[in-house]
Each structure stands twice: as structure tokens, then as C-alpha cells.
Image (tube, rainbow, N blue to C red):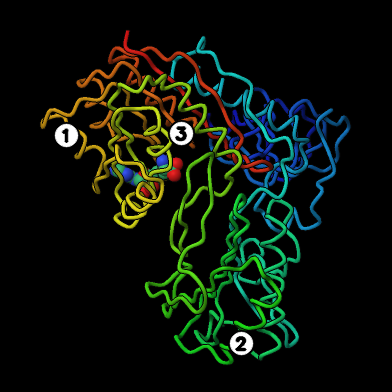
Amino acid sequence: MTKQSIPVQKNEYIDVVFEDLTHDGAGVAKVQGFPVFVPNALPNERGQVKIIKVKKGYAFGRLVETYEESEYRQTPPCSIYKQCGGCQLQHLSYEGQLVFKQKQVKEVMARIGRLPDVPVHPVLGMEEPWRYRNKAQVPVGEREGGLVAGFYQQRSHEIIDMKACLIQQEKNDEVVQGIKEICGKYGIRAYDEQKHRGTLRHIMARYGLVTREAMVVLVTMKEELPHKNSIIEEITERFPQVKSIVQNINSKRTNVIMGDKTNVLWGEEYIYDLIGDIKFAISARSFYQVNPEQTKVLYDKALEYAQLTGEETVIDAYCGIGTISLFLAQQAKKVYGVEIVPEAIEDAKRNAALNGIENAEFEVGEAEKIIPAWYEKGIKADVIVVDPPRKGCDEALLQTIIDMKPKRVVYVSCNPATLARDLRILEDGGYETKRVQPVDMFPHTTHVECVAVLELR
Ligand code: SAH
């Protein structure tokens, strides 16, 4: 649009009707077709907006007043919702969130995937969508002589103390709170980012939902931790579920939380958890899904879509610690997993052994290189499962799938936009997308996970 034709001006007050939500949860209103993004506004609401910033193709506004509220609007249950920024949709009822997420996936399938008719099922949500996270990771600071821990105030590095996080397992909240008190009592100083000194940088707590085992990780600036034994004793006395206390040392000036060195201070190196019948060992550094209850829902869907009979060779690309691979191995003849992070592959092998699974093999490397190499060696999959990071699959991998012609592709995705893009490529290569099932892994945030199944035409 030329400058003259932009229909809104900075500092102007206008009345609008909101039509949509952006993928990051802001309301969208159109003024003569020109989109205005407004935080905290919901579709079907009417209100007054002050224009804050005008760009070439869109503008940002602030909601001044709401004349008509959405049937899905609710008062955010968390008292620090606005300051924290960890959740983006608490002002929308859970029912409304599921409606929004399904609509978002449908639109992206039509617009990016050119698949307006592909069935997108209603989102599988949680019955109790609170207290689901099994991992807490909080920065530590000091206030009036005591320790605080919580989150950085938006656009600053000021730490806001957090006593409870409503999407976090209560056990993790209790442990973090306890460690703040115990370390505070022994005069442990918080790490000071600016001066690059002090001791305690982050507290991490992990919890096995099924096993009820907890792990504590203290991320410190140096190896030395004053009053170490007394601190350990108090933690174990107060929290009998803690099976592992670990120290991670991070001496760098960095925003990265963990350093390279990890010492077990007390107890085990691992805690365990189960997803379905499969047991996983979780170390301080391991990747593990943060919502295990919904992970089971997602993987059950992936398994259902794979339609295995026990005779198939399956490839699990982007396999991480082998979670999906081990799920599939129970119902396939052979599973090959590939993943780029060497430690994750070590975990995958350990997890296979832990469960007595002998028909799964894992290899470190880029999926787009390893899978073509397997193909050359004569390994041909009947079913391929992919679960790539947000940027989606590498084109070379999609091309290998098209060449290898497995009868089915199951695509697990944390980003509907790249999913739709890749589905289009597979469609053009001879596949048909049968259905897309969104699963709500992260209630109250804008994230949406999907599993799609394609069949060779
Ligand atoms: N399927 C796993 C993890 C999926 S997350 C689970 O459910 O737990 C995506 C994974 O892809 C990450 O573990 C990341 O390390 C890996 N990855 C990223 N790029 C890759 C590539 N080019 N080849 C193989 N793996 C890759």
C-alpha cells in the first residue's frame, strides 16, 4: 500500500471488530482490509483501539475499551499472567482455545498447503489443562537479602519472584520454593549477570508423572558450593520424592542455561518416567517431552495412523531420545531411528535396552543424509514417521521419501505452517493427505502440535 492509502494513523482511536487471532495470540481487526494486531483482544469482540505503530502492511494497536466481549473470554486464573508472558491465551477459555487451534490448523492447510478439504479433526485437549509441565527451570536473583526465582520481566533482566505457576506440576513449584529457602538460609548468593559473580544461576526441577520421582539441578557459576552437605541434607529431608540432586556448572557469560560439566551431588544420575508401557531414563541434560500425558495421546495417534501389523520396517526421522521409535517398535518388525544430537541417540539406545526392545536401531546424523544412505544400502521403509523441529523437514529428506515410496507417512509436527508446506511437497510427489489431528500439548500457550497421515496414491 502507498502511504496515502494506509487507512490508519499513529495515535488515532478507532472502533473495530476483531475477526481472528494471530499465531502468537493477538487479536486481528481489519480496517478497510488493512490488518491491525491488538494484544488481549479476541475474535468476535468489538472495541476501541489506539493505534501505536504503523508499518507498511499492518499496524499494532492497544485495546482501550471492549464494547462487546467474546463468549469465550475469561478472567486469567494466574495472577502474574500479564507480566510473565509464558502463557498467551489465559484470557480465552479452554474451550475457546481448542476452537481457535483447530481453526488455525484448518486455515494454514488451505492457505499454505492448498489442502482446503483435508479433514482437520477437533483438537484433542486435556481434561484438566493445568499443572501439566514436568520441568521447571527458573533463574535466581536476590531481593532484600533473600533469594527470588521465577522469570525475567518482559524486555528486562529483572527477575520476578514466582511462588506458583499454574501450568507447572505442583511438586516442582514446591521444590523450587524449598530450594530458594534452603539456599537462602545458608547464605548462597544469586548469580549477578552484570558483575558476573555470585553462585546460584538457575534452579531446575524435573518430575516423573508416573513414577513420582523428582530431580533437582542446581546450576552454579563455579564448582564450589558452600554448605553443600547441609543443603543436600535439608533437600532430601524435606522432599522425599527427590531421588537425584545434580549440580551443573556454567561459568560463561551467556543466556544458555546449562554449562558443560555436570556432577551428581546425591542419589542417582537418572530419574525414570513412563509413557504408556515404555520407561525412560531422564538425566539433567536429557530432552524429554514436558507434557507426558498429552505426549501419550499424540504418540497413540501416530501409532494408530501408522497401521502396523508387525511385519513392517519403519523409519523414525528426527527421533530424539527414541520416544516414538520405541512406541512403534512394539508393533513393527524393525525400527530405524535417526537424530542429529549424539547424546539423544545415547539416551535412545539406553531406553531401548531398559525396555528390552531389540528391534530398534539408532544412528546419529542428519536425517536428510542418513536416510538416503540407508536407502542405498537397501533399507526400505514401509512406513516413515517424521517429527522435525519447527522449521520442518529438509527438502532432500522429502525427496528421499518420494523416491523410497513407503506406503504411509506419518508426520508429527509442532508447527502447522511448515507441516502444510511439506504436505504440499509430498502431495505433489504422489501422496495423499488423509487426515490431520491436532493435539494440545501446551494448554494456555499458542502452540499446537499435529499428527498427519499420508498414503501413496
Ligand atoms: N521425536 C522426538 C523428538 C522430536 S524434536 C520426541 O518425540 O521426543 C525434533 C528433533 O529433531 C530434535 O531432537 C532435534 O535434535 C532433531 N533434529 C534437528 N535437525 C535434525 C536433522 N537435520 N536430522 C536429524 N535430526 C534432527
Read off the residue under disc 3.
413
Query: What's the residue type where badge 2 is placed?
Result: Arg
Query: What's the residue type where badge 1 is placed?
Result: Trp
Above or below 187: residue 346: above
> In the drawing, does residue 59 fall left or right of residue 344?
right
Q: Earlier in the sequence, mark 2 or mark 3?
A: 2
Q: For the residue labelled by badge 1, is the local secondary structure a helix, a strand or a loop? A: helix
Residue name at image x 81 percent, y 56 percent = 79
Above or below 83: residue 158: below
Mark nearest the camera among 3 and 1 is 1
Q: Is mark 3 within 8 Å of ligand 1?
A: no
Numbered mark located on residue 238 in the image: none
The answer to the question of whether label 3 and label 1 lie on touching residues, with beta carbons closer than 8 A, is: no
Read off the residue under disc 1.
374
Query: What's the residue type where badge 3 is placed?
Result: Ser
Quadrant containing ligand 1 reads: top left
Residue name at image x 43 percent, y 77 percent = 263
Q: For the residue labelled by badge 3, is the local secondary structure a helix, a strand or a loop? A: strand
The answer to the question of whether label 2 and label 1 lie on touching residues, with beta carbons closer than 8 A, is: no
Quadrant containing the C terminus is top left
Residue name at image x 86 percent, y 40 percent = 65
- Determine the image quadrant of residue 40: top right
Distance between the alpha carbons at the discs numbered 2 and 3: 42 Å
Q: Position of residue 440 (x, y in %)?
A: 61, 35
Q: Position of residue 46 (x, y in %)?
A: 82, 29
Distance between the alpha carbons at the discs numbered 2 and 1: 53 Å
Residue name at image x 47 percent, y 65 percent = 284
Q: Earlier in the sequence, mark 2 or mark 1?
A: 2
Numbered mark located on residue 189 in the image: 2
Pick the front one: 417 or 250? 250
Distance between the alpha carbons at the discs numbered 3 and 1: 23 Å
- Determine the image quadrant of residue 362: top left
